[in-house]
């Protein structure tokens, strides 16, 4: 490349995994190492550090993902090497979709020339599942309980249909101070379709120092056990549990269904 040629910027949307650095892929670590600008929600940018003094941190508590995505694209279009940070996997209720939405809407052709890469990460459902065994061993689905970005009626319909179809269900964003009643209502919907003994796994801060993983049942789970740093996995009719040698519990969903 001649020195006069305009430099094409790079934008890498990365997933940090749930928290522990040994659950971060080498490709993600390399992207962080090479980044000039790091864009993201402050909590996640902090988790992604430490950084060198010359690396610019454009972190904020601003929840508008599209604005953050546009900032990252704009910097990359200027020729910078930019990383956008998400927790878990960037494609699961996170920044990758926001970046693509901002790109599709962008009139500026230089934004479309940015070298855009999405680097996957371990999602909270996978990390939590691994802690207790293999509850996602057969068909499963993920549903966000947040009705900030979609109507509650649609969430209820998805819960009903997923429960009827006997999917294992991983609930993201199950509860928050601003959304206190949604989880209790979701559990009511699920209890109409599933046995009270259905195994339920609560993964709180998985992969972080405050990690707490609990195995309970659909009858016993209390919404108070769950906050926004928790993921809830509801077993299917086939999900089983049995005691582990150390007093904990193994949970798994077999690879097969009994013949009709
Ligand atoms: N992109 C993320 C999900 C972001 S949505 C991923 O793939 O994991 C935010 C929700 O993810 C939280 O409300 C919580 O339900 C879940 N979550 C994220 N990290 C978690 C962790 N370390 N432990 C438990 N749940 C987590």
Image (spheres, rainbow, N blue to C red):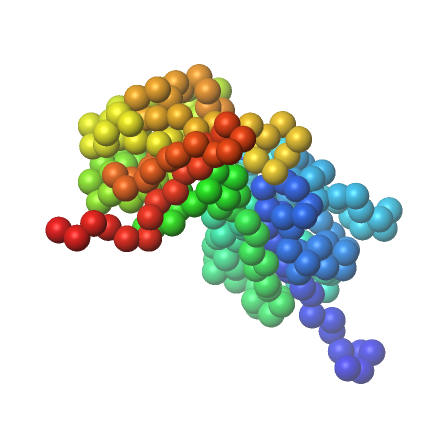
Residue 28 x, y percent position in the rendering:
66, 56
Which residue corresponds to the image point at 62% horizontal and 67% vertical from the top-left? 115
164 and 157: which is toward the camera? 164
Q: Is 90 above or below relative to 41?
A: below
Residue 110 appears anywhere in the view: no
Residue 249 screen position, x and y as percent: 45, 32
Residue 148's spot in the image, x, y percent? 41, 33
Name the residue rendered at 57%, 59% in the picture. Answer: 118
- Could you tell whether 165 is left or right of 119 in the image? left
Query: Where 119 sits versus 49, above or below?
Result: below
Q: In this view, does 49 lie above or below 190?
A: below
**Residue sitting at the far left:** 260
Which quadrant is the N terminus positioned in? Answer: bottom right
* Percent coordinates x, y for residue 237 in the rendering: 25, 39
Q: Which of 162 and 180 is in front in this view?
A: 162
In the rendered picture of this protein, how many numbered marks are placed on residues?
A: 0
């Amino acid at each position: 490349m001649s020195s006069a040629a305009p430099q094409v910027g790079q934008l890498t949307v990365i997933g940090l995994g749930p928290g522990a650095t040994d659950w971060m892929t080498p490709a993600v670590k390399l992207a962080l190492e090479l980044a000039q600008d790091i864009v993201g929600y402050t909590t996640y940018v902090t988790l992604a550090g430490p950084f060198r003094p010359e690396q610019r941190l454009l972190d904020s508590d601003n929840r508008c993902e599209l604005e953050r995505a546009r900032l990252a694209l704009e910097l990359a279009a200027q020729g910078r090497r930019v990383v956008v940070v998400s927790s878990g996997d960037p494609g699961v209720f996170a920044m990758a979709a926001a970046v693509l939405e901002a790109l599709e809407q962008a009139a500026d052709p230089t934004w479309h020339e940015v070298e855009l890469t999405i680097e996957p990460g371990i999602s909270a459902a996978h990390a939590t599942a691994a802690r207790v065994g293999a509850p996602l061993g057969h068909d499963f689905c993920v549903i966000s309980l947040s009705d900030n970005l979609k109507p509650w009626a649609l969430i209820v319909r998805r819960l009903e249909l997923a429960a009827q179809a006997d999917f294992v269900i991983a609930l993201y964003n199950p509860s928050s101070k601003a959304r206190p009643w949604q989880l209790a209502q979701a559990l009511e919907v699920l209890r109409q379709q599933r046995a009270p003994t259905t195994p339920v796994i609560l993964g709180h801060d998985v992969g972080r120092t405050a990690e707490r993983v609990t195995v309970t049942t659909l009858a016993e789970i209390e919404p108070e056990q769950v906050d926004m740093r928790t993921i809830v996995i509801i077993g299917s009719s086939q999900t089983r549990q049995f005691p582990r040698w150390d007093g904990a519990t193994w949970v798994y969903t077999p690879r097969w269904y009994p013949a009709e």
